[in-house]
Amino acid sequence: MLRLSTIALLGLLPIGAACSQPTSTWKEEVLLHDGTRLVVTRTRIFGGLGEPGQHPVAKWRLSFTAPDKQRTQIKLEVPGGVHLMILDRDSSGVFVVAGSPRRGDAYNDYGCPNPPYVFLKYLEGRWQAIDLAAFPSDLVKPNLLGDTREEYVGGGYVRAEQIAEANADMQTDDYAKAVLRTPLKSVRGFGCMK
């Protein structure tokens, strides 16, 4: 005969399981503007509220080993509403990232930028926000996979050529296909609360 406390514990198992954050991880071969290829591990962490059948992304993680003598491990984590577009190096060899806030919460977290991008630079062991003027103007075309549906990432490894092809075929707004340097006429659809 089961004890009441055992039954109570069994009843709590689904609640604990529901609180864990499922993830999806794959590797991307990222082609930098100088021809260097980096293998980047990308992880999306699901969580938060969503509509039935949706699996909202709570966070994105990106990690890689820098091609330096120290083989520095570099990691970046951004909110789920930020669409990562570019990982590359500036003229001094410092890593930079461009992303676009795609949800109102992320857009507001970054101060409602127009053009709608977030720029980061890896300095002194951490990612720091930079403005558009500090982001290299020759880095325009996304080299990170834009469409992260399972049909693209399900194999666990996405080559640079596959990324370029998938990004070219992606049906999305112009600002997500390239880093634009002119402000949009309206950023109303982004959900800015300013």
Image (spheres, grey):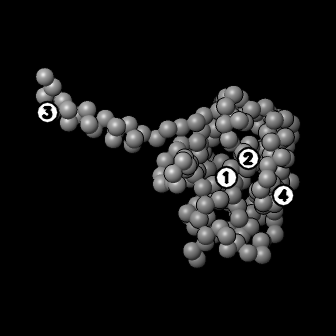
Q: Residue at x 60, y 55 (%)?
A: 81
Name the image quarter holding residue 32. Answer: top right
Q: Is residue 170 left or right of residue 111?
A: right
Circle 4/circle 3 CB separation < 8 Å: no
What distance separates the C-alpha of mark 2 from that of mark 1? 7 Å
From the image, tell me which residue sits under label 3.
4
Q: Earlier in the sequence, mark 2 or mark 4?
A: 4
Between 3 and 137, the one nearer to me in the picture: 3
Do tag 2 and tag 1 residues touch (Cβ < 8 Å)? yes
**Gap between marks 3 and 1, in whole Å?**
48 Å
Q: Looking at numbered disc 1 in the image, what kind of residue is underneath it?
A: His
Three-letter code, disc 4: Ser
User: Could you tell me if the residues under marks 2 and 4 are in contact, i.e. CB atoms within 8 Å?
Assistant: no
Q: Residue at x 84, y 35 (%)?
A: 161
Of labels 3 and 1, the one closer to you: 3
Q: Where, by quadrant of the figure, is residue 154 drawn?
A: top right
**Residue at point 56% right, 53% down?**
79
* In this rendering, the label closer to the viewer, 2 or 4: 2
Give whichever of 115, 22 is nearer the camera.
22
Disc nearest the viewer among 4 and 3: 3
Q: Mark 2 sits on what residue?
A: 146
**Front disc: 2 or 3:** 3
Query: Residue 16, position in %: x, y?
Result: 34, 39
Q: CA distance from mark 2 to mark 3?
A: 51 Å
**Amino acid on which the number 3 mark rests in the picture:** Leu
Residue behind mark 1:
83
Q: Residues within 10 Å of mark 1 (few under 14, many from 20)?
A: many
